[in-house]
Amino acid sequence: MNNLKLHLNERDADWQLREADDRHRSILNALGAIVVRCDGNGLVLSVNDVGHTTQLCAFLS
């Protein structure tokens, strides 16, 4: 029974994380601007959909 509870809790947590990711992505795309997330060394970690549909390299050079 405990294993089933743990499994259901993990599935719920996964679903909540996916929902949060979807909301976050929607907000970033609704901005209409390029949003780039980089680490401390300047390595690009993510780009929103607007950035993918433009010539992002022209903005970064």
Image: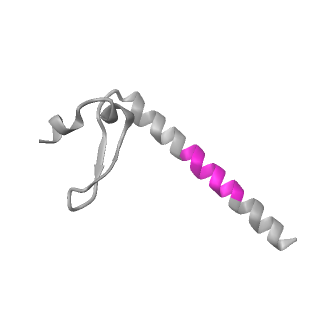
Q: Position of residue 45 (x, y in %)?
A: 33, 53
Q: Measuring 65% from the left and 50% from the top, which residue is drawn there?
A: 15
In this rendering, would 17 be left or right of 11? Answer: left
Name of the residue lying farthest toward the right: 1
Q: Is residue 35 above or below residue 7?
A: above
Q: Is residue 4 magenta?
A: no
Question: Exactly how many numbered labels are in the figure?
Answer: 0
Q: Is residue 5 above or below residue 56?
A: below
Q: Main secondary structure of the magenta part?
A: helix
In this rendering, would 40 be left or right of 28? Answer: left
**Which range is magenta?**
11-20
Q: Position of residue 27 (x, y in %)?
A: 44, 34
Q: Measuring 31% from the left and 39% from the top, which residue is drawn there?
A: 35
In this rendering, would 3 be left or right of 52? Answer: right
Between 60 and 33, the one nearer to me in the picture: 60
The C terminus lies in quadrant = top left
Between 59 and 22, the one nearer to me in the picture: 59
Between 53 and 3, the one nearer to me in the picture: 53
Q: Position of residue 43 (x, y in %)?
A: 24, 56
Q: Position of residue 49 (x, y in %)?
A: 38, 34
In this rendering, would 37 be left or right of 18? Answer: left
Q: Is residue 14 magenta?
A: yes
Name of the residue lying farthest toward the left: 61
The N terminus lies in quadrant = bottom right
